[in-house]
C-alpha cells in the first residue's frame, strides 16, 4: 500500500517533535533529514498551504503529495480506499478532535461530518496560525443582526462561525469532505470551495434525517437516481479528486435494487461506493442487514472495479474480519462503534487468523469455506471472545479514549456544546443494536455518569470531570495549549510528545480560557445545553415533549398545510420506535 505521507515511516511522536521544535539556526533537533527545508517551521508549512498547489506549482514546504495526486481519478480512489478503515461522517461528531483521534489510533481515512452544500458558500478560508489549522469561517457580518447579537454573547464565536477546521499536517492524504446536496450545480459550487484541502469528495445519499431529506438530499436521492447521477457526473467532470457516494440498502432482502443504483452512480463517474447495511426506516437498535449487504458487495465486485466500502454494526475486530472476508469489500467504515471505542481501529497482528486459542472459539478462520460458516445473523448476535473480541487486548480502555478526545477538543478549541455531546455519545449505548448492548461495558473507573457530563458547560468542566492530565502540543512550540481544571493550578506535566532534547518539554497547566459561566452571557449557553441534556438524560420524556409540541402546532393557523404534514410524518416516525418493551429492556441494560 502506497504510503500517504513521505515521512510516515517515522512515528507520529517523532514527526510532531520535529515540526514543533525547529532549531533556530536551521535544521531539526534530530539529524534525520526530510525533503522539507531544514529551517521550515510548522507555521511556514501552513502559510504555504494557503497557495493552491498543482503539479506545475508544487509545494516546497508541505509534505510531499501522495502519489495518487499524479494519477487519474479512479487510480487515485483505488489508492485512497483499498484496504481502508474509515471514520464515518457523523453530524456533530466527525469534527477535528475525533478525526485526529481516529487517525492516531489507526484509521486510514476520516470523513468530515455531512455539510449542506449552501452552508460552505459564505465561508472564508482562513489560516489559523495559533492552532495550525485551515478554518472555513462564516464571518459574523454575514449573519443577520439578531444572530450577530447572540454570537457576541458566545465566547467561542466572537468573529464568526467555524464550519470546517482541517489540520493539514495530520490529515493530508487522509481527509474526505462529505456534503449533503440535492442539485449538481450546488454540489459543484461547494466542492470547488474546498476540494484543494480534501483528498476526496463524498456525496451523502443515505442520511434519513429530516434536515437532509426535506431538502432533497441524503436518502431522498435513493428514490431519484436521475438526480443522484447528475450530481455525481457534474462533480466527476469538474473536480480533479476522487468522487464517491455513501448510500443505504434499497431493499431489506433483495440486493438487486441497491446494485442497480450503485452501478448507475459508477457509470456516472463515482470512483468509490460506501454502503450502509440498513434500509431507510431501520432504527439503530435493529441489527444491520449483513446478509443483504454481503450479497450487494459480492455482486458489485464481480462486475465493477471501483472500491466498495461496508458500514454497519462493526463493533469488534471479529466483525470487521468476518464482513471483509465474506463480502470481499475493499474497506470498512466505523460510526457508532468508533464512538464506543475509537481504538477499534487498531488492527493488531494481521497474521492471526482465528485458528488458535488466543483468538477465541467464536472467531472463524479467514479461509474457511462458506458452507461451514455460522449464519451471519447468529454471528452478529453472539459474544465474540479472545484476541479480536469485545475484550480484545488490542483495545485501549474506553476511559482513556474519552480523556484523549477531551484533550484533542482543548487542542483544537472545539465548541464545548459539541464536545459534551460527543462525550455523552461515547458514554451510552442507547443507539447500539439491542442484541449487542449486553456486551458493551458502560462502567468507568472514575464513576463518571451522563448526569455528570450534562452539568458541564465548558471544556474546563469536562477536563475536571474526566481528570484529563496531559496536553497535546501545538505545531509551534510557542503556541502550546495549556489546559487544566480550576483545582489543578500549577501542576507540572511533562509532555512526552515533545523532544526531550529540546527546550520547553515541561508544560504547566492553567485553567482554560473558555470557562465563562452561563450567568455571564445572558443564559445563551444554558439554553443551548439544556436541549442536549434532556436528550441524553431522559430520551423518552424528550420524545414525548416533542410530540406534544407538534400536537400543539396543529391548533395554530400560523403553520402551512405542508408544514403540518411534515410534522405529522416526523411524529409518526418517532412513534414507530417507541416500542415500550424495547425501551424497558434498554433501560434495564443501561441501569445494569
Image (cartoon, rainbow, N blue to C red):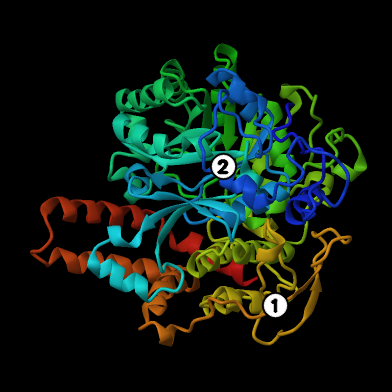
The single residue placed furthest to the front in the displayed view is 25
In the rendered image, the vertical position of residue 438 relative to residue 449, given as above or below: above
Q: Position of residue 569 (x, y in %)?
A: 26, 51
Kindly report the distance in space between the C-alpha atoms of the residues bearing marks 2 and 1.
Answer: 44 Å
Q: Is label 1 in a helix, a strand or a loop? A: loop
Query: Would residue 66 appear left or right of 265 to someone viewing this image?
Result: right
Q: Is residue 267 at least partly visible in the picture?
A: yes
Q: Where the N terminus falls, by quadrant?
A: top right
In the rendered image, the vertical position of residue 200 relative to residue 207, given as above or below: above
* Camera-nearest residue between 40 and 310: 40
Q: Quadrant of residue 441?
A: bottom right
Residue to which mark 2 is pinned: 49
Query: Would residue 54 appear left or right of 332 to someone viewing this image?
Result: left
In the rendered image, the vertical position of residue 170 relative to residue 350, given as above or below: below
The single residue placed furthest to the right in the displayed view is 357
Q: Is label 2 in a helix, a strand or a loop? A: helix
- Checking the image for residue 447, the label placed there is 1
Q: Where the C terminus falls, by quadrant?
A: bottom right
Rate crowding at label 2 as few (under 14), some (14 to 19) or many (20 or more) other CA atoms within 10 Å: some
What residue appears at the point 36 percent right and 24 percent down from the top-left corner? 234
Q: How many marks?
A: 2
Closer mark to the observer between disc 2 and disc 1: 2
- Checking the image for residue 495, the label placed there is none
Q: Residues at badges 2 and 1 in contact (C-beta under 8 Å)?
A: no
Q: Position of residue 275 (x, y in %)?
A: 52, 33
Q: Quadrant of residue 81?
A: top right
* Camera-nearest residue between 382 and 274: 274
Amino acid at each position: 500500500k502506497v504510503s500517504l505521507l513521505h515521512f510516515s515511516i517515522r512515528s507520529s511522536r517523532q514527526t510532531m517533535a520535529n515540526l514543533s521544535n525547529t532549531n533556530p539556526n536551521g535544521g531539526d533537533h534530530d539529524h534525520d533529514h526530510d525533503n522539507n527545508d531544514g529551517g521550515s517551521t510548522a507555521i511556514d508549512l501552513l502559510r504555504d498551504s494557503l497557495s493552491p498547489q498543482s503539479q506545475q506549482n508544487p509545494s516546497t514546504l508541505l509534505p510531499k503529495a501522495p502519489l495518487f495526486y499524479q494519477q487519474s481519478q479512479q487510480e487515485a480512489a483505488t489508492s485512497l480506499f483499498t484496504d481502508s478503515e474509515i471514520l464515518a461522517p457523523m453530524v456533530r461528531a466527525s469534527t477535528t478532535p475525533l478525526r485526529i483521534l481516529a487517525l492516531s489510533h489507526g484509521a486510514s481515512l476520516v470523513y468530515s461530518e455531512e455539510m449542506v452544500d449552501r452552508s460552505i458558500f459564505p465561508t472564508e478560508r482562513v489560516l489559523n496560525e495559533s492552532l495550525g489549522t485551515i478554518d472555513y469561517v462564516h464571518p459574523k457580518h454575514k449573519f443577520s443582526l439578531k444572530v450577530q447579537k447572540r454570537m457576541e454573547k458566545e465566547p467561542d464565536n466572537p468573529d464568526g462561525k467555524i464550519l470546517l477546521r482541517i489540520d493539514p499536517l495530520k490529515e493530508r492524504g487522509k481527509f474526505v469532505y462529505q456534503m449533503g446536496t440535492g442539485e449538481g450545480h450546488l454540489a459543484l459550487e461547494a466542492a470547488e470551495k474546498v476540494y484543494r484541502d480534501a483528498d476526496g469528495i463524498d456525496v451523502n445519499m443515505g442520511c434519513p434525517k429530516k434536515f437532509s431529506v426535506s431538502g432533497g438530499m441524503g436518502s431522498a436521492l435513493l428514490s431519484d437516481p436521475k438526480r443522484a447521477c447528475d450530481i455525481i457526473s457534474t462533480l466527476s467532470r469538474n473536480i480533479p479528486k476522487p468522487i464517491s457516494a455513501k448510500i443505504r440498502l434499497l431493499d431489506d432482502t433483495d440486493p438487486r435494487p441497491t446494485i442497480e443504483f450503485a452501478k448507475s452512480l459508477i457509470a456516472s463517474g463515482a470512483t468509490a461506493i460506501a454502503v450502509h447495511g440498513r434500509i431507510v426506516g431501520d432504527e439503530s437498535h435493529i441489527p444491520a442487514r449483513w446478509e443483504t449487504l454481503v450479497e450487494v458487495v459480492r455482486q458489485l465486485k464481480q462486475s465493477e472495479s471501483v472500491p466498495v466500502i461496508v458500514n454497519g454494526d462493526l463493533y469488534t475486530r471479529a466483525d470487521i474480519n468476518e464482513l471483509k472476508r465474506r463480502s470481499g469489500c475493499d474497506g470498512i467504515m466505523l460510526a457508532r462503534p468508533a464512538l464506543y471505542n475509537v481504538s477499534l481501529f487498531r488492527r493488531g497482528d494481521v497474521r492471526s487468523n482465528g485458528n488458535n486459542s488466543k483468538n477465541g472459539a467464536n472467531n472463524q478462520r479467514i479461509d474457511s469455506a462458506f458452507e461451514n460458516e455460522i449464519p451471519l445473523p447468529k454471528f452478529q448476535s453472539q459474544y465474540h471472545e479472545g484476541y479480536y473480541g469485545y475484550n480484545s487486548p488490542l483495545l485501549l480502555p474506553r476511559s482513556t479514549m474519552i480523556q484523549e478526545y477531551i484533550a484533542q477538543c482543548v487542542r483544537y478549541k472545539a465548541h464545548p456544546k459539541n464536545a459534551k455531546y460527543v462525550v455523552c455519545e461515547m458514554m451510552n449505548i442507547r443507539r447500539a443494536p439491542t442484541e449487542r448492548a449486553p456486551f458493551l461495558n458502560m462502567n468507568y473507573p472514575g464513576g463518571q455518569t451522563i448526569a455528570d457530563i450534562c452539568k458541564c458547560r465548558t471544556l474546563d468542566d469536562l477536563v475536571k470531570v474526566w481528570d484529563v492530565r496531559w496536553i497535546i502540543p501545538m505545531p509551534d512550540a510557542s503556541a502550546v495549549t495549556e489546559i487544566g481544571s480550576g483545582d489543578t493550578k500549577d501542576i507540572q506535566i511533562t509532555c512526552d510528545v515533545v523532544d526531550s532534547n529540546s527546550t520547553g518539554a515541561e508544560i504547566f497547566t492553567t485553567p482554560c480560557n473558555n470557562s465563562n459561566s452561563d450567568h455571564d452571557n445572558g443564559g445563551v449557553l444554558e439554553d443551548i445545553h439544556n436541549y442536549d441534556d434532556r436528550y441524553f438524560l431522559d430520551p423518552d420524556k424528550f420524545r414525548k415533549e416533542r410530540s406534544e409540541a407538534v400536537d400543539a402546532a396543529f391548533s395554530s393557523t400560523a403553520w402551512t398545510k405542508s408544514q403540518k404534514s411534515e410534522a405529522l410524518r416526523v411524529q409518526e416516525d418517532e412513534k414507530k420506535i417507541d416500542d415500550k418493551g424495547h425501551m424497558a429492556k434498554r433501560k434495564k441494560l443501561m441501569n445494569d
